[in-house]
Amino acid sequence: MSLESYQNELIEQSMAVDALKFGTFTLKSGRISPYFINAGLLNTGPILATVSAAYAATIVAALKDSTAAFPEFDVLFGPAYKGIPFAACTALQLHTTHKKPVGFAFDRKEAKDHGEGGNMVGTPVEGKRVVILDDVMTSGKAVRGAIDIVTRAGGEVVGVVQLLDREEFGQDGKSSTVKELERDLGAGRVRSILKLRDLMAWLETKGMQEELQKMRAYRDQYGVNKDDA
């Protein structure tokens, strides 16, 4: 399989800043993973430009996809703290590159008790259609928390776009976390810039056979079937 140019650029630049690593890592779930991504290290102008361009391209492609119902929306929501620059920069990319004007919003970890108050910042989401930007979804706990924040503020979450889909089975031990989430949001409403299969395809093109074999073993143990991902 061939990757889009923005996918290749994101992988290579993420590795250059150590945000994406291949090795041995213990996840919060207790699983031993042969790769790890730390979105907090995507923190320079050049890499943010690449990340936001990839988010924007993924969103535009989803909106044009006639086979799935990814809807039009009004606001990008970036969960604090990592999601804040992603939402702001992606809103800018959508406007400057794709001529699609949308607002962006984010939450505070602690509600502000003075000034405008509350725990939401940016474009008001009340009565608006909202797309959440996520980094890496494993169990889906974080993104469900973001959905709750937006819903309590009066917004309607109509989609989620994540940086990386690990393509692992979720809380029920059978289907993927993405499919679990789409049961609530609707089919085709959770999109990803990169998936596990994309990382594996990239490793293969680079001849990184040792890393690729470890990824295959991990997928065989924890991965969902390709048709169910």
Image (cartoon, rainbow, N blue to C red):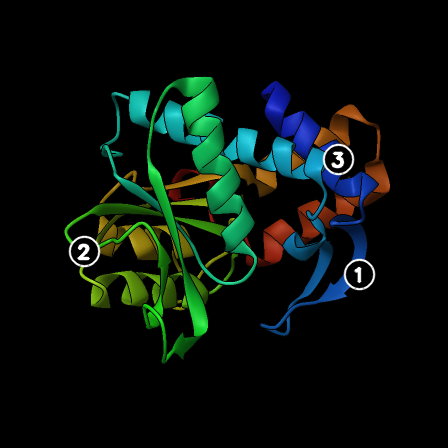
Of 172 and 125, the residue lying toward us: 125
The reply to whether residue 166 is visible in this rendering is no
Q: Relative to residue 204, is residue 173 depicted above or below?
A: below
Q: Secondary structure at mark 1?
A: strand
How far is mark 1 from mark 3, CA to CA?
A: 20 Å
Q: Earlier in the sequence, mark 3 or mark 2?
A: 3
| Residue 59, percent from left and from top | 40, 31
Which image quarter is the C terminus in? top left
| Residue at figure coordinates x 31%, y 49% from the top left | 123
Q: Earlier in the sequence, mark 1 or mark 2?
A: 1
Report whether 227 appears left or right of 13: left
| 10 Å crowding of disc 2: few (<14), some (14-19), many (20+) | some
Disc 3 residue type (three-letter):
Gln
Q: Earlier in the sequence, mark 1 or mark 3?
A: 3
Numbered circle sitting on residue 24: 1
- Give the residue at mark 2: 126
Disc number lying in front (1 or 3): 3
- Give the residue at mark 3: 13
